[in-house]
Image (cartoon, helix red, strand yellow):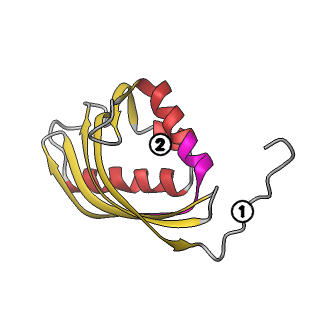
Amino acid sequence: MPNDLTPGDGQDLFASFKRAWEGRDPDAMLELFSEHAEYRADPFLEPMRGLVAIREHWNAIAAAQDHVEFDAERVWVSGRTVLGSWHAALTERATAERVRVRGFSTMELDDQGRIVRLREWRLRRVVGIDSSYRRRAASAGE
């Protein structure tokens, strides 16, 4: 991959992120990250460091969310950094709450095109109950 990214590279990265999140596929998500990546999902929390921590985060997301929709609104590139504003909608499996999320991400990439640092800022709001969603009945012992 050349030194500077193109706008198409940024769009491709967000398209891969979209496929992984909407597919609730932690393996596909981890393919986007370098081995020693740092991921800060909230500016006020400590970053996750390394693929093990990032996998744990995305495993939890895949288990907790359903009916995920994600779209990048605007994508910019500067050198080896991709910046983007985006929105998402999802259903929380435990409560059937429908949630809307708006966010902004910065993704710094290595020479192989993998994310070495991802920072996100998110606002989320519950907008109702997903009437098409049927929660699984709790099994004995839960």
Please tell me whether residue 66 belongs to the stretch shown in magenta: yes
Separation (CA) of disc 2 from disc 1 = 25 Å
**Label 1, residues with CA under 10 Å away: few <14, some 14-19, many ≥20:** few
**Residue 55, percent across and down?**
51, 33
Question: Would residue 141 be found to the left or right of residue 37 on screen?
Answer: right
- Give the residue number, with chain letter if any, for mark 1: 135
Tell me if residue 132 comes above or below residue 49 in the rendering: below
Please tell me whether residue 3 belongs to the stretch shown in magenta: no
Magenta region, residue range = 60-70
Name the quadrant containing residue 141.
Answer: top right
The residue under the point 26% across, 52% down is 10
Q: Mark 2 belongs to which amino acid?
A: Met
The residue under the point 53% across, 46% down is 61
Tell me if residue 68 comes above or below residue 59 in the rendering: below
Q: Going by the picture, which residue comes out furthest to the bottom?
A: 131
Q: Going by the picture, which residue comes out furthest to the front?
A: 141
- Give the residue number, with chain letter if any, for mark 2: 29
The residue under the point 12% across, 41% down is 79
Element on which disc 1 rests: loop
Residue toward you, 49 or 15: 49
The residue under the point 76% across, 58% down is 136
Question: Would residue 96 be found to the left or right of residue 124 on screen?
Answer: right
Q: Earlier in the sequence, mark 2 or mark 1?
A: 2
Question: Would residue 101 be found to the left or right of residue 90 on screen?
Answer: left
Residue toward you, 32 or 90: 90
**Label 2, residues with CA under 10 Å away: few <14, some 14-19, many ≥20:** some
**Residue 59, percent across and down?**
57, 39
